Image: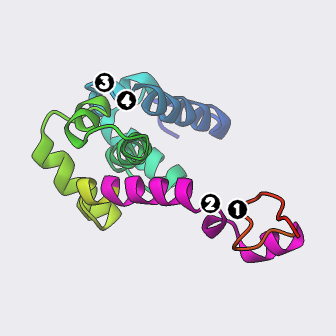
Amino acid sequence: MSSKQEFTYPKIYLYRRIVQSKLFIDSNYAKHIDLDNISDEAFFSKFHFIRLFKNVYGKTPHQYLKAVRIENAKKLLKDGESVSEVCFLVGFDSLSSFSGLFKRMVGQSASTYAAIHKQNKALAAKTPLAFIPGCYAYQHGWSENSNFEETDL
């Protein structure tokens, strides 16, 4: 037996620290945060932290941060914010890096994504019944011609 004893933390302690770091990312994604900030929040060395985080969440902290930023960007684009405004609101410093990452992760450019949602919103306002599942509309007696109003017989 060696004279130096190793201390291992209980798993619950490790998981709490990792969850706390995830919550830190969730609430600070729009700020300029990096791996140093996040691993400091968890009180782990960077390399140990990356390994633990990936083991728990299936992606590295940086991959998770990018995913959180893009998901929030999608929400803002749906709400009608401009692409350049959204880029900076979710924590990116460069419009070109935001646009490239958005297209890679979502499968279409941010401007196309915004345009499609703007078009769908206008179409839903014009023809709301088209956006309600047919079985639900049928169950409630709505027809294509009723536009949710009672029809005069």
Of tags 3 and 1, the one toward the viewer is: 1
Mark 1, residue position: 147
**Distance Cα–Cα, label 3 vs label 1:** 45 Å
- 136 lies left or right of 109: right
User: How many numbered discs, if any?
Assistant: 4
Q: Residues within 10 Å of mark 1 (few under 14, many from 20)?
A: some
| Residue type highlighted by circle 4 | Ile
Question: Which badge, 3 or 1, comes first in the chain's sequence?
Answer: 3
Mark sitting on residue 68: none
Residue 2 is covered by the magenta coloring: no
Question: Which badge, 3 or 4, comes first in the chain's sequence?
Answer: 3
Mark 2, residue position: 128
CB atoms at circles 2 and 1 under 8 Å apart? yes
| Residue type highlighted by circle 3 | Lys
Q: Residues within 10 Å of mark 2 (few under 14, many from 20)?
A: some
- Residue 69, percent from left and from top: 36, 41
Any part of residue 9 in sight: no
Q: Residue at x 47, y 33 (%)?
A: 26
**Distance Cα–Cα, label 3 vs label 4:** 12 Å
